[in-house]
Image (cartoon, coloured by chain):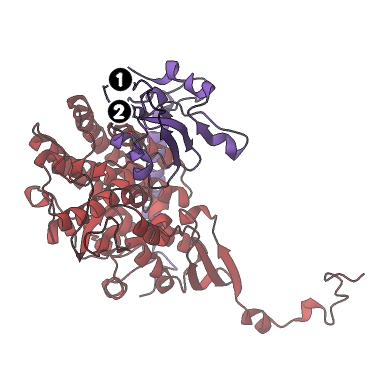
Amino acid sequence: MQTRWDVGEPEKPTINIETEQLKSDLLTLNMGPQHPATHGVLRIEIWTDSEVVAHAIPHLGYLHRCMEKHSENLDFRGVIPFVDRLDYLASMNMEWTYVAAVEKMLGTEVPRRGELLRILTAELQRIGSHLMAFGTYALDLGAFTPFLYAFEEREKILRLFEEVSGARLLYNYIWVGGVWNDWTSEQLDRVATFCDTMEEEAKKYHELVSMNKIFVQRTANVGVYSLQDCFDYGASGPVLRGSGLSWDLRKNVPYSLYPEFDFNVPVGTGEVGQVGDCWNRYYVRMREVVESIKIIRQVLAKLEPGPVMGKVPKIIKLPKGEIYLRHECPRGELAFHLVSEGDAKQPYRLKVKSPCFTHVSMLPRVAPGQMIADFVATVGSIDIVLGEVDR
Amino acid sequence: MSTTVQETNSFKEYFSGLFNGISTTVKGMWITFRYVWAVKPVSIEYPEVREVLPERARMRLFNDVQNCISCTQCAMACPVDCIYIASEKLPEGTEIKKTSNGQAIRLKLTQFTIDTALCCYCGLCTTVCPTECLTHSLDYEFSQYTIDGMKYDYLAPDVIAWRDRIVKS
């Protein structure tokens, strides 16, 4: 029986093939879906010419869970656990954005303590998310130790969240009308201690990674997004700020109680490399951690005893209408477009505008001409979470 | 908009780069080397040493059927529909029992099953429970060989026996 492997002798010895013929073909290389550098199940089809990337095509959908469609069959409270699973590294921010959209349509007043606790959890979550981004980015570039250091600090945040909400990753903590549980003073003291240690740790990370020659060589001048690119593709968050625009929804379009707080918006300055490269994006994140610590300290000073839940009807029914509400999440600008048919218990449509989706679509822009190793650094630097891309 | 790769370095750049590379690496090595003696280990060696879970931790669900009034609010609140409840009317003339917080049990619970494999541990069912009989216990090690084993019938005698171990108050 002839198998497909019995192709006989080659007509021409391969050694005589002209080099021009070798150049004509691009090698297709699949990066993912289980590639560790893609932080999830992103598959990128790379066409390479030797080691240089000619095209990169992201293929999405490996983590698609029909969340948007499924939420049309759930009541407004039941959507919250599903919203958690969008960006599983920043669940608190996801919950808050969704809940804020529902509250705005419902016209609920959130007590001041509840709102401050939301800011507290959201900023803690931002630190946790950026620590994860920092750790895995260093891991992508071959440094294992920063990953462990980052997880040590992140564990403290997760432990606090576990005590206050009951879960470590998918909290279901921010509810329509407020937050589920109140923080005890002992837990708030631990937040204050965490802020102190985190500031020290951030300095350590800068010494260990940010200014390290190997790290700088791998990331500086790599994967440069110009500001025009960011506008064209609609980038937001650290990617946009790394490209030099000071745009933070907490500052520019203030929501919640953020106008009361004093903090800066870190922008890529290009002190190493150039503005818009991987190093600047990374550095913006690390400086945002320090800004978040600033906000947390102010929250702790402002907190006063009081209720954490406002008055919400037992069955939530939204009036007819729609809302588009956006918040600044660790990865960028997350928005929910919520449409209600009027007197319905379920949303008529829930559309998620995800920042990671935009950032994934920016990859083909910067990939051509890069080395494969540099492309890995670029993918890591935009810090995507596939749960949010695919939904 | 292309990344510039510098092909050649000047004499000064070469040596400053060399110095920078060595000094930053040594600095990083020193930071990690301090962990040998100055920092206590943080990892918990799981099967031997177990972390104490916080009071609110949301682990396996437990329903105390003696206090359940079959109101099906938990089943309605569940976003993944993993709670199966069936009940029937009490026969005429039976004495109406009361739950621990004084609510009358007017229906006879014939089935209370939770598919733990489907459960997403969101905690919405426990918050709507009027008698607080449905709670999250602190059990987290309950792997099974088959997926059917994850379905717990809370009316089964062996599952009722968990009560002595789990229920806090």
Q: Chain of mark 2?
A: B
What residue type is disc 2 on? Thr
**Residue in front for this viewpoint, A11 or A384:** A384
Position of residue A280 relative to residue B95, above or below, is below
- Label pair 2/1, CB-CB below 8 angstroms: yes
Residue located at (26% from left, 22% from top): B102
Left or right of B119, for residue A261: left
Q: Earlier in the sequence, mark 2 or mark 1?
A: 1
Q: How many marks?
A: 2
Q: Position of residue A280 (x, y in %)?
A: 30, 58
The chain letter corresponding to purple is B
Q: Position of residue A83 (x, y in %)?
A: 33, 52
What residue type is disc 1 on? Ser
The chain letter corresponding to red is A
Labelled disc at residue B100: 1
Disc 1 is placed on an element classified as loop
Q: Chain of mark 1?
A: B
Q: Position of residue A168 (x, y in %)?
A: 37, 37
Task: State the quadrant of the C terminus of chain A.
Answer: bottom left
Q: Is residue B13 visible to the viewer in this orientation of the structure?
A: no
Residue located at (33% from left, 62% from top): A354
Q: Is residue A159 visible to the viewer in this orientation of the structure?
A: yes
Position of residue B3 relative to residue A295, above or below, is below
Disc 2 is placed on an element classified as loop
Res. B43 image quadrant: top left
Labelled disc at residue B131: 2
Left or right of A291, for residue A46: right
Mark 2–mark 1 Cα distance, whole angstroms, equals: 8 Å
Residue located at (36% from left, 57% from top): A73
